[in-house]
Image (tube, helix red, strand yellow):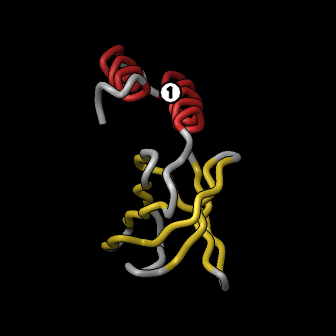
């Protein structure tokens, strides 16, 4: 699922790799460096945070305040719905379902 990462002077699209109520892992090019304050928008959810770590093509953002539980659950359901359309094997689809239910990462 696309995510938007915004700094004061720049906005860019990244791919959401994983997320929780307290942070997100993003994939993309020219991502902000560790220590950079950012705003992350996933669907209609906006979260402010700081890039906690970065490596070429990946970064982790720690949110300033945890996302509400209902938003995390809704986003996970939405991501699972997309995954079931794109995954081809039963194992992949079951893994996506486990992730939504909090059984897997």
Report crowding for label 1: few under 14, some 14 to 19, many 20 or more residues within 10 A (C-alpha): many
Q: Write the residue at 59% across / 37% down.
A: 71
Residue drawn at x 52%, y 77% is: 37
| Residue 105: x %, y % from top left | 30, 37
Query: Is 7 above or below relative to 89?
Result: below
Tell me: 69 left or right of 24: right
Query: Looking at the image, which is closer to me, 35 or 11?
Result: 35
Question: Residue 99, percent across and down?
Answer: 37, 29
**Image quadrant in which the N terminus is located:** top right
Left/right of residue 5 with respect to residue 24 in the rendered view: right
What is the quadrant of residue 91 in the picture?
top left
Q: Residue at x 43, y 52 (%)?
A: 22
Seen from this angle, which residue lies furthest bottom? 9
Residue 35 location in percent, x, y? 41, 81
Most extreme residue toward the right is 44
Secondary structure category for the residue under label 1: helix
Mark 1 — residue?
Answer: 80
Tell me if residue 73 comes above or below residue 26 in the rendering: above
- Tally the marks: 1
For the point 42% across and 63% down, the residue is: 62
Residues 84 and 67: in front is 67
Q: Is residue 44 left or right of residue 96?
A: right
């Amino acid at each position: 699922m696309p995510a938007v990462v915004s700094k004061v002077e720049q906005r860019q699209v990244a791919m959401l790799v994983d997320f929780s109520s307290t942070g997100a892992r993003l994939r993309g090019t020219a991502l902000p460096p560790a220590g950079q304050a950012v705003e992350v928008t996933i669907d209609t959810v906006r979260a402010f945070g700081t890039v906690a770590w970065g490596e070429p093509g990946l970064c982790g953002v720690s949110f300033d305040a945890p996302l509400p539980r209902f938003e995390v659950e809704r986003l996970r359901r939405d991501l699972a719905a997309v995954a079931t359309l794109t995954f081809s094997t039963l194992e992949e689809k079951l893994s996506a379902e486990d992730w939504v239910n909090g059984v897997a990462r």
